[in-house]
Image: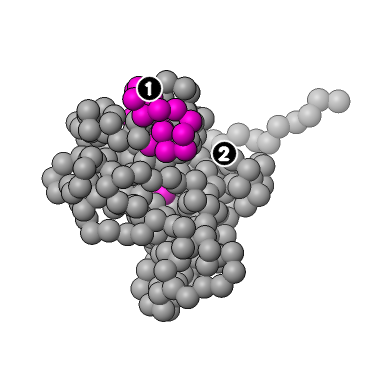
Amino acid sequence: MTERSAPAASASGRGTPARRTAVRAAATGTLAAALLGLAPQHALAAAPAPPPAPAAPAVSEARAAATAPDTLTTLSRFFARDGAVAAAKARPRIEGRTVPVYVLSPDFVRGEAGAPVARLEFLASTAVSADGQKASVWTARSRGAWKVVNIATGDDEARYSAAADGGTVFREPQINAWYEQRGDRVRPLDAEARKAIGAGGTTVAAYQKRVAEAYGDKLPGSAYDRRGAAGGYGPQDGAEGAAAAARPQPVAAGAAADGGSGPVTAASAVAGTAALLALGLSGAAALRRRHSR
């Protein structure tokens, strides 16, 4: 038996009575939404735009700072800190691309309309020593120039950036979770992220709901922040307190980059601290970060 198709619309565009009724109903619904100031359903589900990428000159300046002689000297001491290699034999070099590092945005956590999921915090270049150790050199703009503000063990920033499939790679520093946002989906890139949102990932809307529930009452300016708990600097007990004591301390803008001997001269610096305190939280997972004078 041949299946019969529905009658086609006439040349006048009137179509069948059922079709005309459906069109009128859709138009009525759209008009009602407009009168009430409501967005169409598809607009409500639209993914936020990705954060802007750093300009090419900024990347070039950041890389120049990471490869400067003073930086390489500091890296030699950094790689020699545990006696794995003598500083004179470390011979550090910068390999691969200098990549932007995005961190979960507090505006997104608040649910502000159109806020990107993440915001740019710093640029990272991967340093490699003669014995194969790796470190991430963080650079940020300070006092009108790009300067090294932190050195961290490992090459997380470069590895997760390389894992991107055309989206924005970002970090949720409070749990050291790495994700990629692409369109309306957020997918996990490490074990912490898979634990947080599942191996299959989730929607941007669902992710926003999760972080709002987790951090919404701990943003800068909150009671949590005002009582000194933000960043782990307030009174704490047990393991969290111990982790906070080992965490880097904030310094004034440019202080670590501009003073002392070499580009990394304080326990922390502007960009490093910003990554940990982007939401005013402590983030014990930041203990991956190792710093050198």
Camera-nearest label, 1 or 2: 1
Quadrant of residue 194 in the image?
top right
Q: Observer-nearest residue: 104 or 20?
A: 104
Say how many tags the image has: 2
Q: Would residue 4 be counted in the magenta stretch?
A: no
Q: Nearer the viewer, residue 109 or 158?
A: 158
| Vertical order, 32 against 223 (above or below) | above
Q: Relative to 241, does residue 47 appear above or below in the rendering?
A: above
Q: Is residue 79 magenta?
A: yes
Percent of width and height locating residue 195: 65, 49
**Looking at numbered disc 1 in the image, what kind of residue is underneath it?**
Lys
Question: Which residue lies at the image location 44% right of the left edge and 46% below the top edge?
Answer: 289
- Label 1 Cα neighbours within 10 Å, binned few <14 / some 14-19 / many ≥20: few
Q: Secondary structure at mark 1?
A: helix
Q: Nearer the viewer, residue 231 or 87?
A: 87
Residue 212 is tagged as none
Quadrant of res 123 = top left
What residue is at 52 percent from the left and 43 percent from the top? 178
According to the image, label 2 marks what residue? 189
Outermost residue, left side:
144
Q: Tell me the quadrant of the picture where the N terminus can be found.
A: top right
The residue under label 1 is 89
Mark 2 surroundings within 10 Å by alpha-carbon count, few (fewer than 14), some (14 through 19), many (20 or more): many
Q: Position of residue 53 (x, y in %)?
A: 31, 37
Q: Which residues are magenta?
A: 78-103
Residue plotted at (49% across, 51% down)? 287
Q: Position of residue 210 (x, y in %)?
A: 57, 60
Which amino acid, mark 2? Leu
Question: Which label's residue is closer to the chain start, 1 or 2?
Answer: 1
Judge whether residue 57 can be spotted in this image: yes
Residue 111 left/right relative to 69: right
Distance from Cα at disc 1 to Cα at disc 2:
34 Å
